[in-house]
Amino acid sequence: MPEHTPSAFLAGAGTDTWTLWLNIMATGAAMALLVLLSVFTLALYLYRDREASAALHFTLANLFATVYITGDLVSRIDALVGNVDGVMPPYRLALGAVVMGLAALLCFHRVLSRRREPRWRLAGIYAVGALLAGLIWVDHPALIIASDQATIRGTQVFADYGAAGAPFFALCMVLVTLINWRMLSRARRAGGSLAWWLTVIGFALVFLTGVHDTLRELGLELLPLSTLTPGFVVFQLAALAAMVIHYSRTLSERTETDHQLRRLADKATRDPLSGLFNRAFLENHLDNLGNNARGGLLFIDLDHFKVVNDRFGHARGDALLRAVAQRIDDTMRDGDIACRWGGDEFVVYLADANPDAADSIARRLLDAFQRIAPGEQDLPRIGASMGFAELTDSDWRRTLRRADQALYQAKDQGRGGVAIAS
């Protein structure tokens, strides 16, 4: 065994060394990019993006490709330092990863073409790929690799291929050609966006480098070095950029969708004039609480509001209702729900409030209403009568009727106050 370390050989192994250094740096970059692709794929699944399944198979293809270039690099370093016995295992691993990578790309294309591709078909493709990859580990003259011997020329490693070696690489080349042609055709139909150009450049580059390295395995050298590793890293960069663009669009679309849903929800649950919840929302909320409801209901009715409408007009009355609603919203605690019940009536669900707490809140509201001064949008001073009933009934509607009766009791006592139902 040589006494030199791998780093010593890499430091002065000759003119082929720079290509090996290039592959080392490209392999490190490929691993880092694979991590980023995996993160974006996970994010797409978390957002339930419709492209998540395609992203998964694409990331698996990148995983197998990273295994290929790593195995290829390790076998080259073993050859360079004279570790002949260690050359073939990573070499076989690299060839097996090529097969699994093609299977993943085929699944990627099928998922893009057919959104509801059955999982058993995809699993079948991976199973066939695993079977072919397994044959690479079997030494036999009639199979892909005939023996554990290898030919080493500088940093280049060439296995002792069996009779099936040439058909194996020809099949890989055909599959690479078909998949890349289909993907380029799909990208071309997508139009001239930035993601389209990145896809075209990436797939075209990985196709050309893959064909070049396949021809080298068959004995036809167009260039004196392997090109797939750096070409794959460029492809990964393009793929990552395209995925980032898609993910950013997904986030933008999701944000816009959330805003639209929120606007629709507001229209369905909010009173358009006051901005408070509407009656239907509060009824539904109390129905859902059922027997778990705690606290009570505060019924509010503005005093002499009809006079405001008759004297100042409905536009001024609407402005007054909005001002009252704002004071109610400002006074409510976390967990309380205020709604406009109808006309100049408001109902507030005071969560976990006993009569003493409700009386305190009601008096803060009365004080807030008094601060709606005539100088504020030329509104007249406003008063209100309130009734509170604690949620001790099995049905909140009975509690609301008791709060309404307490409200009328407050009016009978001279208005501008609060009454607590017994």
Image (spheres, rainbow, N blue to C red):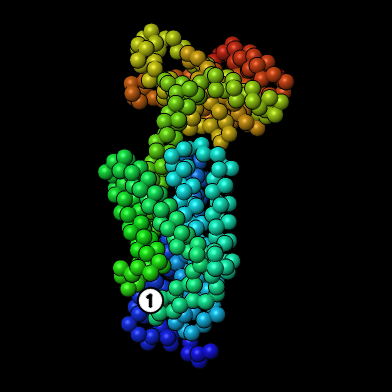
Closest to the observer: 156 or 237?
156
Q: Quadrant of the C terminus?
A: top right
Q: Residue at x 44, y 82 (%)?
A: 80
Tell which residue pokes out farthest to the top in this image: 310
Closest to the observer: 145 or 201?
145
**Amino acid type, residue under disc 1 in the picture:** Trp
Q: Residue at x 43, y 39 (%)?
A: 113
* Coordinates of residue 146 in the picture (x, y in percent): 54, 70
Crowd rating for badge 1 (residues with CA inside 10 Å; few <14, some 14–19, many 20+): some
* Coordinates of residue 41 in the picture (x, y in percent): 48, 50
Direction from residue 56 to residue 388 in the image, left or right:
right
Tell which residue pokes out farthest to the bottom in this image: 3
Mark 1 highlights which residue?
Answer: 21
Give the number of callouts. 1
Direction from residue 189 to residue 357 in the image, left or right:
right
> Helix, strand, or loop for circle 1?
helix
Closest to the observer: 134 or 304?
134
For the question of whether residue 371 can be seen, the reply is: no
Q: Residue at x 53, y 89 (%)?
A: 1
For the question of whether residue 185 can be seen, the reply is: yes
Q: Specify the quadrant of the image occupied by residue 129.
A: bottom right
* Coordinates of residue 255 in the picture (x, y in percent): 41, 39
Q: Is residue 352 above or below residue 93?
A: above
* Coordinates of residue 97 in the picture (x, y in percent): 50, 61
Q: Specify the quadrant of the image occupied by residue 354.
A: top right
Q: Residue at x 72, y 20 (%)?
A: 393
Direction from residue 149 to residue 420 in the image, left or right:
right
